[in-house]
């Protein structure tokens, strides 16, 4: 085979590899990949794209998170997610855990059209989870939601002065799956023996 032909093949192969690398490049350096999961991500363009998207979304949540405790909760949740990801044994598992994490981080980034409250508070069983400005939504019947990057809660008014409440409980979880029970109104707050949810305009 002529040298010119070999050179063309080498050049074409190099360009193809560069293109593949550009498409599949995850957020980490694939030359330093050591685990089966990291190598699987580096060799799969969809997984590489999911990893890069997640890294960008994580940084967006980090920038939107204020306060040392909230940022520590974000780090803790990311470490827990990485441990879960690294337990995957096949591609469908990796795709699923990436999409679940992206959904959770999507919830953490507030909609720019959301209502801004001057101060919000969420206390559950003696622990304070939200205390400061936040975003959320407000309905005509007085029902509302408050959320920060880590936690959010919702109040659904059943009748004047009486509502039911829910919150996500697990930092950065995307669903308000934990019941706060029935709450009574006291000014800008809704309270019962275990919880208090407040939103000041």
Image (spheres, helix red, strand yellow):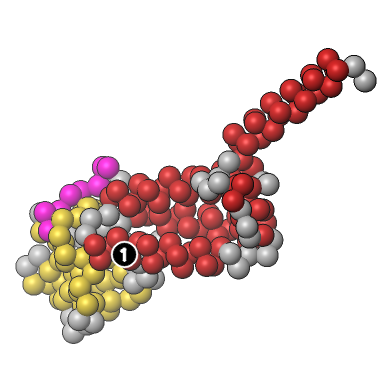
Q: Mark 1, residues whose alpha carbon is within 10 Å: few (<14), some, or many (≥20)?
A: few
Magenta stretch containing residue 114, yes or no? yes
Secondary structure beneath dot 1 equals helix
> Would you say the magenta stretch is mainly helix, strand or loop?
strand
Q: What range is drawn magenta here?
A: 112-119
Q: Residue, x 58% and y 64% (percent of image)? A: 86
Q: Residue, x 45% and y 55% (percent of image)? A: 103
| Residue picked out by circle 1 | 72
Vertical placement of residue 18 versus 128, above or below = above
Q: Position of residue 42 (x, y in %)?
A: 63, 47
Q: Is residue 65 left or right of residue 140?
A: right
Which is more toward the observer, 109 or 3?
3
**Identity of the residue furthest to the bottom in this view:** 193
Q: Residue, x 16% and y 64% (percent of image)? A: 131
Q: Residue, x 20% and y 48% (percent of image)? A: 115
**Identity of the residue furthest to the left in this view:** 187
Q: Quadrant of the C terminus?
A: bottom left
Residue 161 can be seen, yes or no: no
Q: Quadrant of the N terminus?
A: top right
Magenta stretch containing residue 141, yes or no? no
Q: Position of residue 73 (x, y in %)?
A: 33, 66
Vertical placement of residue 196 versus 120, above or below = below
């Amino acid at each position: 085979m002529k040298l010119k032909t070999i050179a063309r093949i080498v050049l074409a192969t190099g360009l193809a590899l560069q293109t593949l690398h550009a498409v599949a490049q995850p957020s980490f350096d694939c030359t330093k990949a050591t685990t089966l999961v990291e190598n699987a991500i580096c060799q799969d363009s969809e997984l590489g794209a999911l990893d890069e998207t997640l890294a960008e979304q994580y940084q967006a949540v980090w920038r939107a998170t204020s306060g040392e405790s909230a940022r520590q909760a974000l780090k803790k949740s990311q470490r827990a997610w990485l441990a879960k990801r690294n337990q995957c044994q096949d591609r469908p598992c990796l795709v699923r855990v990436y999409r679940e994490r992206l959904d959770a981080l999507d919830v953490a980034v507030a909609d720019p059209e959301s209502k801004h409250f001057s101060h919000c508070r969420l206390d559950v069983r003696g622990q304070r989870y939200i205390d400061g400005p936040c975003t959320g939504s407000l309905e005509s019947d007085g029902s509302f939601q408050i959320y920060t990057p880590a936690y959010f809660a919702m109040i659904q008014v059943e009748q004047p002065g009486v509502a039911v409440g829910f919150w996500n409980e697990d930092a950065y979880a995307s669903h308000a799956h934990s019941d706060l029970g029935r709450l009574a109104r006291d000014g800008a707050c809704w309270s019962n023996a275990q919880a208090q949810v407040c939103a000041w305009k």
